[in-house]
Amino acid sequence: MAKPRNKTLDYLAYLGVRLFAMFVHMFDWHANYRTARWLGDLMFRFDRRHRTIATTHLRLSFPDWPDKKVRKVARASMRSMVYLALEMLFTPRVLTPERWREHIRLANQRENLRLLTRRETGIVYIAGHFGNWEIVGYTMAVLGFPGYAVARPLDNPYLNKYLMGVREQAGLTILDKTGASAMMDDILENKRYVAFIADQDAGRKGLFVDFFGRKASTFKAPALMAIRYEVPVVVGYGLRLGEGFEFEIGIERMIHPHEWADKDDPLRWLTQEYTAALENVARRAPEQYLWAHRRWKHRPKGEPPAIGGVA
């Protein structure tokens, strides 16, 4: 049974975030990104647990890298996480139908936009903890393509309501992952789209596929939905372009139903295929990947536990 949360502390945390949001709106982009960079560096220096997780993952994923480069990328990864928090506060105010072109560059989107415009099929979107993953779905909604995203609610109910509201202002409906499957019939059969963050550890019951040369437990739901409803899987990303609230929103891979139709194990093939696409994205800008989350926490049966208990 979960321990009851302290409502007073939760509300104080919420007030702190709202005050911080008010504060950052008083300054320009460069000042805010400098502050975020400083906070990320502080995290790297003093948050030993997440620093260890990030550097361990990088050493295993890039075994040829010298330690100096590992630490440099791990530090940049923590900065990227703080940048994301900062950018979420600005997104509703800045990313509007009138101004989105000032901040967004679309890449390899022609076929994706054709599918969205014609609405001939539902779509399962996949993204990873890379760059600004929150802005990907938000941008699609701003462009006039409202849809659904599956997410775990925050433990703090006040922060959850506030940040979920930020996500939903443009028309992106957030579904609680514990009950999302009940809505998939309506969403995909009505040729709408649903988005997943698909690079989280799925526990011992997940499907183990290769990610940076190691088996990683991966949720089955995105692939199961695509196979059941015979809809394409689209792997997207939100690459941060410097420190000026500018992003490349791109499509890395589109996987159509005919590609897995003749596979002996379509579930495993599809899960591995989109996981490989997420890896390709992370390899292009590893400093923007969230190395501090425990992607390799659980190991396949028969393998030893994660190295140092952190992987």
Image: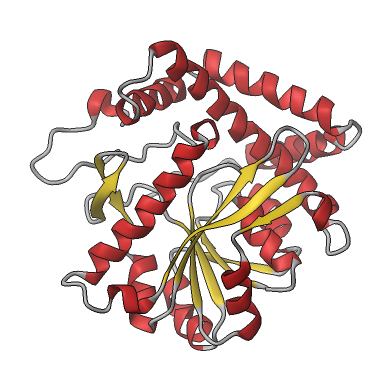
Q: What is the image's colouring? A: secondary structure
- The answer to whether 306 is drawn above or below residue 248 in the figure is above
Q: Residue at x 75, y 23 (%)?
A: 35
Q: Position of residue 1 (x, y in %)?
A: 36, 50
Name the quadrant containing residue 309.
top left
Q: Position of residue 187 (x, y in %)?
A: 52, 81
Q: Residue at x 25, y 51 (%)?
A: 209
The residue most toward the left is 302
- The answer to whether 217 is drawn above or below residue 26 in the figure is below
Q: Position of residue 301 (x, y in %)?
A: 11, 46
Using residue 303 as the reference point, say whether residue 224 is left or right of it: right
Kindly tell me whether residue 167 is visible in this rendering.
yes
Q: Residue at x 54, y 85 (%)?
A: 191
Name the quadrant containing residue 173.
bottom right
Q: Position of residue 81 (x, y in %)?
A: 59, 34
Q: Residue at x 39, y 48 (%)?
A: 200
Task: State the residue in front, 307 or 64.
Answer: 64
Kindly tell me whether residue 161 is visible in this rendering.
no
Total residue callouts? 0
Task: State the residue in front, 93 or 58.
Answer: 58
